[in-house]
Amino acid sequence: MTVENTEAGPLSRDGSLYVTGNYAPVQKEVTAYDLAVDGEIPAELSGRLLRVGPNPVSPVTDPVNHHWFNGEGMLHGVRLRDGKAEWYRNRFVRGTKVLEALGEPPIPGPTRGFDLANNTHVMKIGGSTYALTEAGSLPMLLSYELATERRSNFGGTMGDAFTAHPRLDPVTGETHAITYVPEHEKVQYQVVTTEGLVRRIVDVPLPGRPMVHDTCLTAKYIVIMDMPVTFSMEAMQRGDSVPFIWDPGHGSRVGLLPREGSAEDVVWCELPGTPFVFHTGNAYDADDGTVVMEVVRYESMFRTNSHSPFADDAHLYRWTVNPATRTVTEQLLDDHAQEFPRHDERLVGQDYRYSYTVTSDDVPKGFTGLLKYDVKRGTGESVDYGRGMLTMETVFVPTSDSAAEDDGWLMAYVHDVATERCDVVIRHAQDLANPVATIHLPVRVPFGFHGNWIAD
Ligand SMILES: [Fe+2]
């Protein structure tokens, strides 16, 4: 399937041109103040809406073989206060390649002699904000204005690597992570305290070197995703920038590791078939001893196009993981093509009702809609951003600490194809049809991965 990209060049599911249209990088670091706003920004929103994505710092010499995951990280942030959008900033994350390209001196902090691109998530851990990626790069500590201050290994306490998708436990304030280094046949479970120090590392043997992108946390368990995309020495030797391959022979399973347990306590539960999941939604322990988790499920990944995650559509599923039978049953929840599931993060690991994803009829071209899915009723409500508007991941922010689930703001960066600029659109989760505020950024924000609202 080939789609005409609306801006420049074909973006296809077979080829890989993740340097065109709104996948194309921006080179300039911009600071803009007092942004134009339609509507009213909720006055209680005081903080920054941050996100990060891949943004090659140097010209891409081989666009057909360029892997979207591999561009250097660029941060985007909008600061809100007193109903105003005070500033927008974008900044490269200062990894080795960025420093070289920009002719800047090294940054402080520990080093491993290399940086992968910290392009995947931006998150507050132990009171500090970091740009994160998986598979071995150190977290990058960020200033309020998105400068890269230093690499961090959590004061020397970090294990072999970190991840872009840890889970913050709203009950304890601790951060739980499943981390991996591609060459190692194991993962590590790491727990980071509210002071930002790793207090617990558990090595769990994991044969076959799978990519382990995300996890789930419940009151009882951390979930290890063992999916059929695996590290390939052959792919690395031939120079693939992301040396992972579709490997259905590896199988698909999830491991339930009791939060205070050891590797011997992991209960592995097999999936039917060989589905692949990058992103999980929320999860919780059901009364019958199973773990109920939500996932965005692909039938395969990198099977026909090793450089694009969007060769197949993904759909919203519920997985019921049964440690007694060591099996997982799957249930399709919503068959829109979708990605980037988010939820009210005050409910991480607990029974919950709503998920928020982005949807599309034509995923490689971009995401056009927002889906709110009610897992209790089994119904979805969606809204389209309108012609030529392409949304990125949606972030949910409660209207107050004591607000009910779903009483909150949904915020997203939205690319406007016609103007080649970006808006930040804010809606109340219970009134999807009527945005309360649209903040106009003076620049384009390329599609990227993830971000968060970081309250002041
Ligand atoms: Fe991700």
Image (cartoon, rainbow, N blue to C red):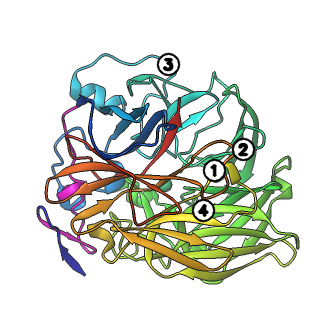
Image quadrant where residue 312 sits: bottom left
**Coordinates of residue 443 in the picture (x, y in percent):** 20, 42
Residue 397 in sight in this render: yes
**Which of disc 1 and disc 3 is earlier in sequence?**
3
Quadrant of image for the N terminus = bottom left
Instruction: Say few, some or many: other residues with alpha carbon within 10 Å of mark 2 (under 14 / 14 to 19 / 20 or more).
Output: some
Residue 239 in sight in this render: no
Taking the spot 50% from the left edge, 33% from the top edge, the residue there is: 130
Taking the spot 21% from the left edge, 46% from the top edge, the residue there is: 444
Instruction: Say few, some or many: other residues with alpha carbon within 10 Å of mark 3 (under 14 / 14 to 19 / 20 or more).
Output: some
Which residue position is annotated with label 3? 109
Which residue position is annotated with label 4? 281
Marks 3 and 1, how far apart at CA: 30 Å
Residue 299 - label:
none
Question: Which amino acid, mark 4?
Answer: Gly
Q: Nearer the viewer, mark 2 or mark 4?
A: 2
Which residue position is annotated with label 1? 345
- Queried whether the magenta region covers residue 11, the answer comes back as yes
**Which of disc 4 and disc 2 is earlier in sequence?**
2
Q: Is residue 302 left or right of residue 423?
A: right
Question: Which amino acid, mark 3?
Answer: Gly
Mark 2 element type? loop
Mark 4 element type? strand
**Coordinates of residue 150 in the picture (x, y in percent):** 46, 21
- Queried whether the magenta region covers residue 293, the answer comes back as no
Marks 2 and 3, how far apart at CA: 29 Å
Marks 1 and 2, how far apart at CA: 7 Å
The foreground one among 335 and 262 is 335
Compared with residue 375, is residue 75 higher up or lower down, i.e. above or below?
above
The foreground one among 261 and 334 is 334
